[in-house]
Amino acid sequence: MRKIIVTAYDERWPAAFEDTAAEICRVLEAGCLDVQHIGSTAVPGLAAKPVIDVLVEVVDIMAVDRFEAEFRKLGYQAKGENGLPGRRYFERGGNERTHHVHCYEQGNPEIVRHLVFRDFLKANPQTAAAYGELKMELAKQYPLNIEQYIKGKQMMVEEIEKKAIGAI
């Protein structure tokens, strides 16, 4: 069972993302249009689960499936859509998760949603701090229950998303 741990911001997260982005670009080559650091580890100063979330924009989402063996060689487990149609999702680290890779085809609205959420938190440090505090509290309250952790932060995530999307 995976324990939920939320830690203070780690200055090494951006470098970990850069290394990961380079690996992914080498695997996907011309099919990769963009790689972005998303999620809480992408927001300086924000407390987060120490998992690097990566958004990959690709030319053709179906083509990503052909690269599962290459992702496996890098330590990733392919999870298909993993509940979100139009996405290809990969995890690295098993129960000691270190990376989540979310691949979307160009034009998928999830790309914008992830990026505006991240950018809103970067531009609004008070909101980011409140979000980080909530996550730390939830991790203490539900250390072995990811569903309750997610449910506990859902309302705040939705509020931030509305503000972020309204700001564009």
Image (cartoon, grey):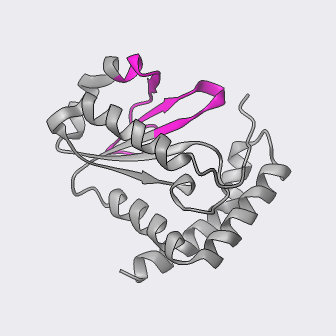
Residue under the point 24% across and 23% down: 66
Q: Residue at x 69, y 46 (%)?
A: 147
* Quarter of the image with the C terminus in it: bottom left
Q: Kindly identify the residue that appears in the image at 24 percent across and 39 percent down.
A: 61
Figure quadrant of the N terminus: top right
Where does residue 155 sit, x and y in percent of width and height? 64, 68
Residue ID at (55%, 73%) = 160
As drawn, the residue found furthest toward the right would be: 141
**Residue 10: image location, x then y, percent:** 63, 50
Does the image show residue 83?
Answer: no
Residue 116's place in the image compared with 102, above or below, is: below
The correct choice, above or below, for 168 with respect to 83 in the image is below
**56 to the left or right of 161:** left
Q: Is residue 33 visible?
A: yes
Q: Which residues are magenta?
A: 71-100
Describe residue 119's horizontal placement relative to residue 159 as left or right: left
Residue 49 counted in the magenta span: no
Q: Above or below — where is 69 with respect to 158?
A: above
Left or right: 131 as drawn, with respect to 105: right
Q: Is residue 17 above or below residue 159?
A: above
- Give 139 or 87, whichever is nearer the viewer: 139
Q: Quadrant of residue 124?
A: bottom right
Q: Position of residue 42 (x, y in %)?
A: 50, 56
